[in-house]
Image (cartoon, rainbow, N blue to C red):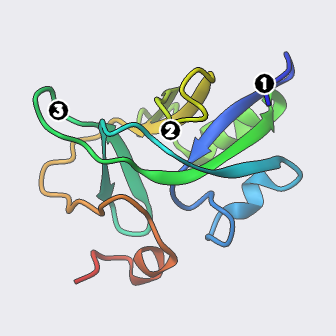
Amino acid sequence: MPPSMDSLLLFVYGTLKRGHQRQDLLGGQQFLQVACTELCYVLYHCGNYPALVPAAPGKSGASIEGELWQLERALLPALDAWEAVDERLFERRPVKLRAPFTEAEVSAYFYLANTAGLPIVGAKWTLAHEQAGQPLQ
């Protein structure tokens, strides 16, 4: 479903997903379906939330599982505030998804801080990661 002028597609992969601690921020918006990124990203564990970053050049990435939502653009200031965009912790920009969304214009929040020393989550952020607040063994 292509977004209208007043909406956009957002890929969420962590605390904004259904059933997670900040799902309320997407209240009233339209969940479309579970989606996966192309194999070019890494998901890091930052305590109570994950951090999506592009894989380093020459390094393999993972296909990250998340959710695709259609949002009203009017919601973006609240989401950007939650994701600390002004503080340069995250940045909203295009993300590459697997079929059937390879041609869709989809955004995601990417982590901008240093990931050195952060553990890699794998392909999916779960409630267990969130509730533990630390990497799962």
Q: What SS does tag 1 mark?
A: loop
Quarter containing the C terminus: bottom left
Image quadrant in which you'd find residue 70: top right
**What residue is drawn where x is 64% and y is 37%?**
10
Image quadrant in which you'd find residue 9: top right
Closest to the observer, 23 or 59? 59
Q: Which label lies toward us, 2 or 1?
A: 1
Closest to the observer, 26 or 67? 67
- Crowdedness of circle 2 by 10 Å Cα count: few (<14), some, many (20+)? many
Q: Which residue is situated farthest in the front direction here?
A: 99
Q: Amino acid at mark 3?
A: Ala
Q: Are marks 2 and 1 in contact (CB under 8 Å)?
A: no
Residue that numbered label 1 is attached to = 2
Q: What SS does tag 3 mark?
A: loop
Q: What SS does tag 2 mark?
A: strand
Q: Mark 2 or 3 closer to N-term?
A: 3
**What residue is drawn where x is 23% and y is 59%?**
120
Is residue 51 shown left or right of residue 27?
left
Q: CA distance from mark 2 to mark 1?
A: 20 Å
Q: Mark 2 or 1 closer to N-term?
A: 1
Q: Amino acid at mark 1?
A: Pro
Residue that numbered label 2 is attached to = 109
- Compared with residue 53, is residue 25 higher up or lower down, i.e. above or below? below
Q: So how many labels did they put on this image?
A: 3
Residue that numbered label 3 is attached to = 56
Quarter containing the N terminus: top right
Q: Are marks 1 and 3 in contact (CB under 8 Å)?
A: no
